[in-house]
Amino acid sequence: MEHKEANSRKIKLLVNNVAREDTVPVDLRLADYLRDWLNLKSVKEGCGVGDCGACTVLLDGKAVVSCIIMAVEADGSSIVTLEGLAAEGKMSDLQEAFLAKGAVQCGFCTPGMIMTAAGLLAENPQPTAEEIKRAVAGNLCRCTGYQKIIEAVLYTAEIRNQKD
Amino acid sequence: MIEQRGKGYEYCRPGSWEELAAILCKAEAGVMFLAGGTDLAVDLRTGKKSCAHLVDLKGLTELQGIAETAAEEGKKGEICIGSLTSIHQLEINPLLQEKAAALPEAACQLGSRQVRNRATLGGNLANASPTADTAAPLLVLDAFLELWSPSGSRHIPVEDLWQKAGKTFLAADEIIRQITLPLAPGRGTAFMKLGPRQAMDIAIINAAASLELEDGRISQVRIALGGAGERPLRMKQAEAFLLGKEATAEHFAQAGVLAAQESSPRSSRRASREYRLATIPVLTERVLLKALSRLS
Amino acid sequence: MTYKHEGVGEAPLRIDGDIKVLGKAEYVQDLEYANLLEAAVLTSPYASAKILAIDVSGVWQVEGVKAVVTGRDVDGLYGTTVQDRPVLARDRVRYAGEPVAAVAAINKAAAMLALTKIRVEYEETIAVFDPEEAAGMKEDKKTVPLLHENLMDYEREITAMPVAGSNICSHFKLRKGDVEKAFSEADFVLEEEYEVPRNHHCCIEPYGVVAQMEREGTLHIWTCNQSPYVLQRNLAALFGLSWNQVRVTIPTLGGGFGSKIYPSLEPLVVALAQKTDHRPVRLLLSREEEFLRITNHGCKIKIKSGVKEGKVTARQMAAYWDTGAYADCGPLVARNSGFTFAGPYKIDNVKLDAYSVYTNLPVATAFRGYGIPHVTWAYELHTDRLAEKAGIDPLQFRLDNVIQTGDISHTGEEMQAVGMKGCLEAVAEAAGWQPGQRPAPVDLGNGRYRSLGVACSWKGSMRHYGSSATVRIMEEGSVEVNVSNVDMGQGSSTIFAQMVAEETGIPLSKIRVQHPDTFITPYDRTTSASRGTFHAGTAVMEAAKDAWRQIQEYGAQVFGCRPEEVKSSEGKVLNPKTGEGLSIGKLINQAVMGGIDIIGKGHSRMKGGTGLDKETGQGANPTSFWMYAADIAEVETDTRTGELKVLKIYAASDVGKAINPVNCRQQIEGGVTMGLGIGLMEEMLFDEKGRLLNGNFHDYKIPTAVDVPEIIPLLVEVPHPLGPYGAKGLGEAPVGPAAPAVANAVYQVTGIAVRRSPLRPENLKLSWQKGKEAELRD
């Protein structure tokens, strides 16, 4: 019987603020680790080669596409998925804005889109529309035409800045 | 495309140069270096590339960072960039924005934000794509590279890195450690890119220029193009033509024509040779104009 | 909690929005099963070949393999209009990418590894890729290989009109008036050719199916499909089951755009599931496989028009639709775009021929607009050339020629509730373009110019297929809406809930719209042709009215009044005598001692639909409703590089009545963006052997956030007498005019017509260069 087993390696990381320790095959993609091992299904598989952004998560605060990163590469880092944005099930302001501004249609690109926007706002709390467009250019959406997505991110920034 | 899990490679992430050297000395063949992995991860999974040892360089934290060395007597100032510095770091770095504008300008147009967060300058160079977005800026910035292998390190001008598409002159156990940009205070630099889409695109042609004037005449000029040949190229005839001339739109247009003459672009799925030749003069002219506008 | 009505005309939050922003929406790839097997498909590397032998014995060397199927294992043929397609290729393959064998194993890696153990011996045969050539219509290439030698023996629908001994699986004809006479009397005649290559739907969710032969005898399918009942019936026929044994469950869909309307790879997965011990088998396609699964049609169009005194008096057109290796809905695309082919213009002499032609390329199917974006590309670029020749401003020329209420259409229909002119006027006003006074291009320096272009389009929905719905009001006051219309992102479930809120006064927050499931939700033909709001909406509205009538009857009984006196207020039923509100539960309890649901039923049964005559294409009522859209594009053209920057798109659609204005704007913004994508950058590229070269998102470009201009959606409301609350459909109409409006703006700058889409910088630059050279030679 032919059945190849990949080499494995132990990794330690924080996922949505929970410490994890797992022994994973060295070629296991981060996306599969999150989806299949941790059941974080907001991480979507849209292309598998880093082109569509549907599997975007935050790695040490930066938006990355988890389908072209190996789980072993994430050893020692902190990962946040969309599930981690909603503290105790309560929607974050960014999620609320996506809903309120009509930025959600089929919803398949939405988790990745929100994660990229979250990464952007963490680094640049007052982005211009142009900066938002450039930031989410790696998150493909076929439904919305992006306009309402840009509005939602602008709106979130505005609300946050009012609070400050 | 048949996807197969478990190509059976060993993965390691050395935390020191000694550890890296030990790994490389032990491994006989089939070593691949992993930086950001934005291209390599896919190639390994689809079987386009394979290796026996995947050496992740991300454990060498000193490979990350951008620092300036001030000018001293007899020595120009420099900016040193660790090869594992992410493209995004280049994009937002104030030092580079001020003193080597072409590089962050190129960085912000490379791939998606997610890719820029992950991809590294060293990886972009070592990938040896003829249209690598950071290549043309480094060529016009006279960058040189510090290479490292277990047998020692050496310095080369960035021009001498590439052989042809996908192939460098790096030895099998050699990596890029640092990219150094000599500073030239009176210089204006710029980058431009032509692609079918306005973002997330591999360039059809990209162009960078650097320009210095003395008494209204061009005292130093560098023009580099990606997509104009088998590797990123300096346009030396066009540069020679401009040297000593006034910086006028007309001269830039003539330089553009010369650049097309010294280019030998290939037809690919992304664009035909004909189209590349038709747009090289325009991009060359425009990038020079943009560099000029940065002088004042 | 304060009472919120959120009925018709309002813009409540999408009812499925919260689960989507929380990442809880479940698409096929997210569903979990016990004992799941993963499928992988081996496809043909050749576009045309005989299969001499297949040896699958090697798959059993791989640990974890549970089933393997080839064409020999599955009898029967399937297909939407022509039953021409085997579940897996049998003696021959007809496109590169056609399924030849499939494996199910305990994980994907084992299934993929097993594919490498299958040996297939092929003998390559001659392939044909150009639809005009395949149709035998090219003078120099009259002899072409036939893809389906027994075409005439296939089972088919009446809408498929094949031509014996050819690759033409359908020839649609429309004949009205006398084009030749009108051409001879015209001031001028212009004849042109246009082409739109194949492009792709690119749903961000790749296709996925799970099939299980359940122990109790049900075939259960979970799939991302837009027409669960069409699939149910096709699978039942193919696998010898009765309809009530086939359960199709539709989870949340990640986009459709036509790519998921008809049965696709579901039969293949069922064939594998039949070979396992009741285990569920899942097929999730990679992006590259999804590109080959199904595509949009490519099309070549010849168009000839006669103009007399500024009016289009005659139009002759021929379209060659490249439907690929199997017909799928190709004949319907030829027909449905066929009868609207001449454009939203009053033209008295029309001669149209639309050919759906087999080629050795992947199967083409429906795509948002069902051929309308292709034909709009042709007739709207052509219209600008006509206006130019006539010396009339292109906006004015359109206003002078467009079809209006009361006009007779090309098929002989007396048009009602036509909003075409209204759409043109709306975009003209918003863009500041006075009819008759087109603004001149603005010179921006260094070869760049800014200019405006206009285009318009219409789309007939389709035949008068039925839809049913039930509205179930439970005693506690919560509501379940059962309808098989698939919400794939267009927001139909929100609209249905609004309709129920409108009719019953029950707040939206208490209304739940079920996912379609053929064991639960009643019949609906299909979610396509922009028919959801109109047809399924009518059914839901009727069901809600029926449920409310029952509540009124209980109210009359309890309050001692006439049923029509019973009204709702803030979610309660009002006693007309006391003005007191009673909850639905209490009312039911008082009337019948409780314990029942109120079940309202509704149907959309359009009467009076006619077909179209086989020879003349004439028919007085071929479509249940029409949609109209117009765009003005503001474009920056770089004449030196060919780059275009679309700055703004003013986009108007006649929606009849906006049930939810935000949803309507979403449809327009998304539709325009899709139209721009196919017009500016999207094209599937095949090599000379018919193999796809760019089946991924880095080589096949769709618009990113940076590419999309400011879109100004404008809602025009010319109510339809039969639509729910006056609504028409909307989904498809905004796609058509976007790209032609851009092309017309570019033409104003360069004066050189580019007739093939997409307007990629290279295509433009090189066409202009050639155009200039041609001018110099002349």
Image: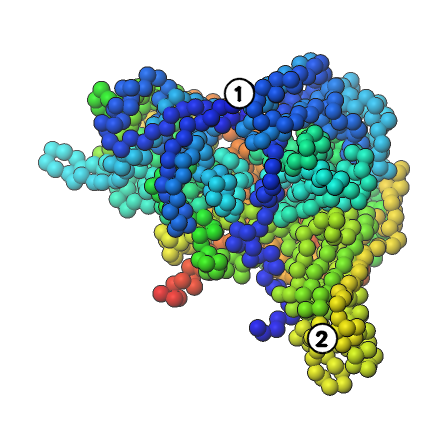
* Residue C160 x %, y %: 83, 35
Cα separation between marks 2 and 1: 67 Å
Task: For mark 2, give the secondary structure.
Answer: helix
Number of other residues with Cα within 10 Å of mark 1, as a class: few under 14, some 14 to 19, many 20 or more: few
Residue located 34% across and 29% down the image: B12
> Label 2 amino acid?
Lys
**Above or below C480: residue B294:** above
**Above or below C161: residue C438:** below
Quarter-wise, where is residue C550 in the image? bottom right
Residue located 53% across and 20% down the image: A2
The disc at residue A2 is 1
Which residue is more in the foreground, C352 or C354?
C354
Q: Output the chain of dot 2.
A: C
Same chain for mark 2 and mark 1? The answer is: no
Task: For mark 1, give the secondary structure.
Answer: loop
The disc at residue C181 is none
For the question of whether residue C142 can be seen, the reply is: yes
Which residue is more in the foreground, C212 or C332?
C212
> Label 1 amino acid?
Glu
The disc at residue C586 is 2
